[in-house]
Amino acid sequence: MLFNSYEFIFVFFPLALLGFVFIGKIDCRFVIPWLALASLFFYAYWDPWFLILLLGSIIFNFFTGYFISKDKKIQN
């Protein structure tokens, strides 16, 4: 799905926006997870293999940042 495709303009974007608005009215804590899941769906729509690649990158970067911040706390 591309940003200028009909699927994005008339299906994905309105659903993501409506979900954002309605979920935000119910409880603001669930808005960020909604947008994160919508983003992952958008990324995986092209090819599910890319989702595995993206999630692997997210996990690797999270733990790398965690260990770097843990190491800096020990040094201070």
Image (cartoon, rainbow, N blue to C red):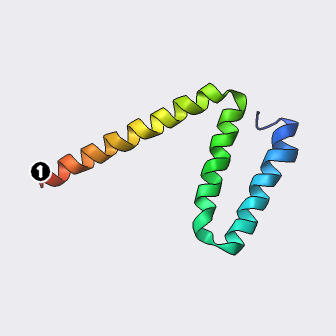
Residue type at numbered disc 1? Gln
Q: Which residue does the image show at 71% across and 61% down from the upper left?
A: 20
Dot 1 crowding, Cα within 10 Å, few <14, some 14–19, many 20+: few
Residue 28 lies in quadrant: bottom right
Q: How many marks?
A: 1
> SS of the residue at dot 1?
helix
Q: In which quadrant will I find the C terminus? A: bottom left
Q: Look at the picture and state if 26 lies above or below 49.
A: below
Q: Position of residue 48 (x, y in %)?
A: 65, 29
Q: Position of residue 50 (x, y in %)?
A: 60, 28
Q: Which residue does the image show at 33% across and 44% down from the upper left?
A: 65
Q: Position of residue 54 (x, y in %)?
A: 53, 34
10 left or right of 61 in image = right
Q: Which residue is mark 1?
A: 75
Residue 39 lies in quadrant: top right
Q: In which quadrant will I find the N terminus? A: top right
